Amino acid sequence: MPTKKPNKPDLRLVAESEVYDLMRGPQTTADRVKRLQAEARALAIEQVEQLERILGEAASLADEIAKGGDAYPVGAREIASRLAEDLPAKAETIKAIVSRLP
């Protein structure tokens, strides 16, 4: 089972961001495109990391259901058992992919 991380701000995203100075002159189109692409990448990484966390939470819940006994329908327990086995590996794969990004 994955361990839960405390909710801490992702300082890397803060470091990759920049404050836009409203008093400076207009940027070139190329500069704006680069800035917007960097913002889009940061948001995409944030969402992928959120998916990783949710998969970990889903794996824990699936494990509880799989081990829940007769209170849960047999089919639901079977599916939950398979999810509890598969989801941690999927979350780790996503984590590895994100960790390779610059």
Image (cartoon, grey):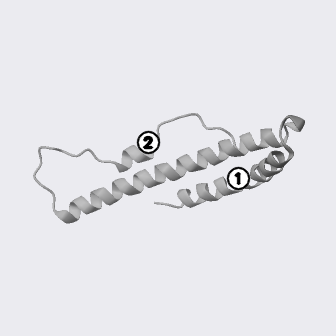
Query: To which residue does mark 1 refer?
Result: 87
- Against 71, residue 45 (above or below) is below
> Taking 28 as reference, is 2 left or right?
right
Query: To which residue does mark 2 refer?
Result: 11
> Taking 44 as reference, is 83 left or right?
right
Residue 1 visible within the image: no
Estimate the x, y position of residue 86 in percent, counting from the top left.
Answer: 74, 55
Q: Quadrant of the N terminus?
A: top right
Who's the residue at 29% across and 47% down the image?
Answer: 18
Nearer-the-camera pick, 66 or 33: 66
Dot 1, how many residues are within 10 Å of its Cα: few (below 14), some (14-19), or many (20+)? many
Residues at discs 2 and 1 in contact (Cβ within 8 Å): no
Query: Distance of mark 2 from mark 1, alpha carbons?
Result: 27 Å
Estimate the x, y position of residue 25 in percent, counting from the top left.
Answer: 10, 52
> Taking 85 as reference, is 102 left or right?
left
Amino acid at circle 2: Leu
